[in-house]
Image (cartoon, rainbow, N blue to C red):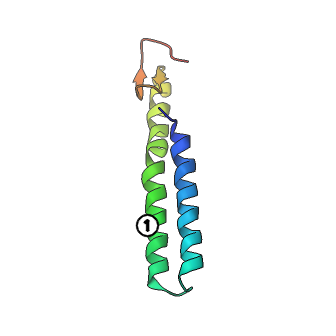
Amino acid sequence: MPSCGFYFVGAFLGSSICFRYAEERVSLRSPVRVIVGVIAVLLVVALAWPLAAQFPAVDTCLDRGGSYDFVLSVGDLRQNHP
């Protein structure tokens, strides 16, 4: 299973491709370019959300003295995870 960082990089590259396509194919003030840009931003947010949402869960688990299991995405207060 790829890491969340992999998804973020993929989303960034995908949005860059969308913006480049819109820049080459559509005039500067076209509403189509705005729509493509909005779709690209939404794609980045949707794919980066799991990574961003995991930080508070990890922090909460570590504050309680536990260890965060990144494979299962849960905090574990009994077992230490690398």
The residue closer to the viewer here, 17 or 47, is: 17
Residue lying at the far top of the rendered structure: 79
Image location (x, y in percent) of residue 53: 44, 43
Residue beneath disc 1: 39
**Residue at x 53%, y 62% (from the top left corner):** 15
**Residue at x 48%, y 49% (from the top left corner):** 48
Q: Which quadrant of the figure has residue 28? A: bottom right
User: Is residue 33 positioned above or below 58 on the image?
Assistant: below
The residue closer to the viewer here, 57 or 81, is: 81
Count neighbours of disc 1 (C-alpha within 10 A) and say few if under 14, some if 14 to 19, many if 20 or more: some
Image location (x, y in percent) of residue 79: 45, 12
Residue lying at the far front of the rendered structure: 25
Number of numbered tags placed on the structure image: 1
Find numbered disc 1 in the image and state the secondary structure of the residue it sits on. Answer: helix
**Residue at x 49%, y 42% (from the top left corner):** 51
Amino acid tagged 1: Ile
**Residue at x 45%, y 80% (from the top left corner):** 32
Image location (x, y in percent) of residue 3: 52, 36
